Amino acid sequence: MNVAKSLLAVLALGSSLAMAECVEPESPTLPDGASATMDDMIAGQQAVKTFQTANLDYMACLEAQFTEAKKAIENGKAANAEAVKAAYEQDVEAYNQAVSAEEELAGQFNTEIREYRAANPS
């Protein structure tokens, strides 16, 4: 009976991981602050905010997946422990890359804001 329950748990884990595909958002193209208009900069700011919202959803999806995989590994309920461990590591790496992408985009946008202000002193 325990074998059947374990098998069902593994199947549930595998199917939930396969079904819940996390979709990485595409980083927006930022306006060139040196030549952009105020409207361009506002549109760029909105694009950054939209990206950040989508990126938070993506990171939450990844976190749910790697948390579930970690629990399965720790509980010894993963039939194919190596595959589950590889998926865990891949999701953690993708999560870290998502954090880096958001930080990089924010830094780039701040640079464009500085260039806009330099080109358009008040």
Image: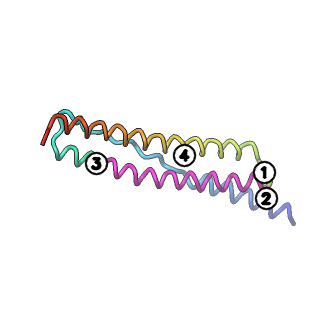
Residue 13, percent across and down? 68, 57
Amino acid type of the residue that numbered disc 4 sits on in the rendered structure = Tyr
Badge 3 element? helix
Q: Amino acid at mark 3?
A: Gln
Relative side of 62 to 52, left or right? right
How far apart are the two marked residues, 1 and 4, measured between alpha carbons?
A: 25 Å
Separation (CA) of disc 1 from disc 3: 46 Å
Helix, strand or loop at mark 4: helix
Q: Which stretch is magenta?
A: 46-75
Q: Where, by quadrant of the figure, is residue 115 drawn? A: top left
Is residue 74 on the magenta stretch?
yes
Disc ID at residue 95:
4
Residue positioned most to the bottom: 1
Q: Is residue 56 above or below residue 89?
A: below
Residue density around tag 1, few if under 14, some if 14–19, many if 20 or more, within 10 Å: some
On screen, residue 1 above or below 13: below
Pointers 4 and 2 in contact (C-beta within 8 Å) = no
The residue that label 3 is drawn on is 45
Q: Residue at x 65, y 42 (%)?
A: 89
CB atoms at circles 1 and 2 under 8 Å apart? yes
Q: Which residue is mark 1?
A: 79
Q: Earlier in the sequence, mark 1 or mark 3?
A: 3
Chief SS of the magenta region: helix
| Residue density around tag 2, few if under 14, some if 14–19, many if 20 or more, within 10 Å | some
Q: Secondary structure at mark 2?
A: helix
Q: Nearer the viewer, mark 4 or mark 2?
A: 4
Q: Measured from the top left, where is residue 66 in percent x and y?
A: 63, 51
Q: Which residue carries the number 2 mark?
A: 7
User: Which sits earlier in the primary sequence, circle 1 or circle 4?
Assistant: 1
- Callout 4: few (<14), some (14-19), or many (20+) C-alpha neighbours within 10 Å? many
Percent position (x, y) of residue 72?
A: 73, 55
